[in-house]
Amino acid sequence: MRRRRAAAAALLVTSLAAAVTGCGGGGAAQGSNDNPTTLTYWASNQGADLEADKAILTPELEKFEERTGIHVELEVVPWSDLLNRILAATASGEGPDVLNIGNTWSASLQATGALLPWTEENFERIGGRDRFLDAAVASAGAPGQDPAAVPLYSLSYALYYNKAMFEEAGIEQPPATWDEFVEVGKRLTGDGRYGFGLEGSNLSNNIHQAYVLARQHGGDFFDESGEPTFTDPGAVEGVKQWIDFMAEDGIVAPGNAEYAQNQSLQDFATGKTAMLLWQAAGTTFESFGMSEDDYGVAPVPTPSGTPGQGTEVNSMVAGINLAVFDNTDNLDGALEFVEFMTSDEEQAVLNAAYGSIPAVESAQDDPAFDTPALNVLKDALATSAVPLPQVPEESQFETAVGTAIKDLFAEAAAGREVTTELVAERLTEAQQQVG
């Protein structure tokens, strides 16, 4: 495929908004089969580090080459660079043939026109749309349009809790409501340890949590026509509740305001915090020496304690999608590769390695995915998770509101009061950045 990667790294986050909404596919042309023996693949960092991803993926790509004769050139791109790299590729028209995208970016990247639309015909070439989880497909592009990608790995959030710390504090059950969560968190806070850990400088994580809390307060960050409504009262309350775990309830260490590189997982695994909201964290805990017998997994709390839809949602639909650049010069090979990666066999191999949930329903029958922890995640994904807004401005939303929340955590960590009015003011400023 024609490609020129060097320019991608120079693109700044501040230019992303224009890239998303301003380009029309970077001159992307229809795919061809001019280069049928090679594919380039950008994989996201799903493992403990980039080398771990290469170790997991390389044998599978060699298996694909043995079957098809197509060599796959793999590059694992860290999350800190991935969106910039993709947007540079959409703007220039020079990127990989196949790539991973965060499912929350689907509509934004779809709007560039640079990705292959997944029509019914294309879905039929990989076994049909019905093979995939409905919630996962709903997070692959804007409603009413052909998806811009195919679900690859599915995830949802759960509450992880340290069994020993709970037992030490005389707590018998994980909290089911937020009132119980704060009460339990306070009982677990003291002597240098905290009840709850989070990543205050992780923009995406801030968005994931604030969005669900906003929905629980009956709000949203976009209206039905796709217009931003960042100061919707429910949205303001959702953001404030997320900040208040540190600012008002005092169950989060102030230092968590600076966390953005999964430090909260290490804190949890080493007994510094007792609870964490995360997606499929088991393999990371294991890397820090924590056994799966040392922690429990429960649904994320809701206002009533019974997860469901409406104001009882308790997770966003998380996951990784697989997309094809529309101007690939190995279209047949790219579709063949997507078919391979979403086959039952590869879904089982890859999702077991990453601790995620297969996006293909039939692959979930594998015993590897019938564990107490994964069953909590699967249940949330099937019954109480909602996609983030599938609108072209979604990536701008993540950057603007995620940064506003990061700044509010900094205020809380400094001991300054975070009022409802201040939250609304910061969200107003964030909305002014989205256009």
Image (cartoon, rainbow, N blue to C red):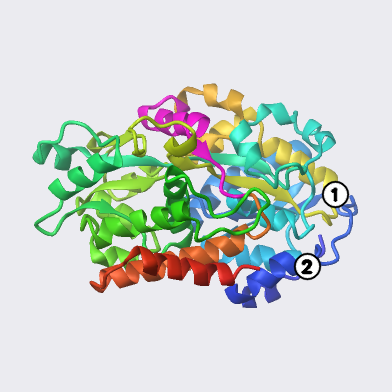
Task: Residue at 20% x, 47% y: name it.
Answer: 185
Q: Tell me, for residue 23, which label it has, or none.
A: 2
Residue numbers of the magenta segment = 369-389
Drawn side of residue 266 relative to residue 340, left or right: left
Per the model, the C-alpha gap separating discs 2 and 1 is 28 Å
User: As shown in the figure, which amino acid type bears the numbered disc 1?
Assistant: Pro
User: As shown in the figure, which amino acid type bears the numbered disc 2?
Assistant: Cys
Is residue 386 within the magenta segment?
Answer: yes
Judge by depth and name the residue closer to the eye, 4 or 265: 265
Is residue 129 something that shows in the picture?
yes
Is residue 346 something that shows in the picture?
no
Helix, strand or loop under label 2: loop
Drawn side of residue 61 relative to residue 243, left or right: right
Quadrant of the rendering where the C terminus is positioned: bottom right
Disc number lying in front (2 or 1): 2
Which residue in the structure is indicated by mark 1? 36
Judge the density around disc 1: few (<14), some (14-19), many (≥20) Cα neighbours within 10 Å: some
Task: Residue at 32% x, 52% y: name it.
Answer: 265
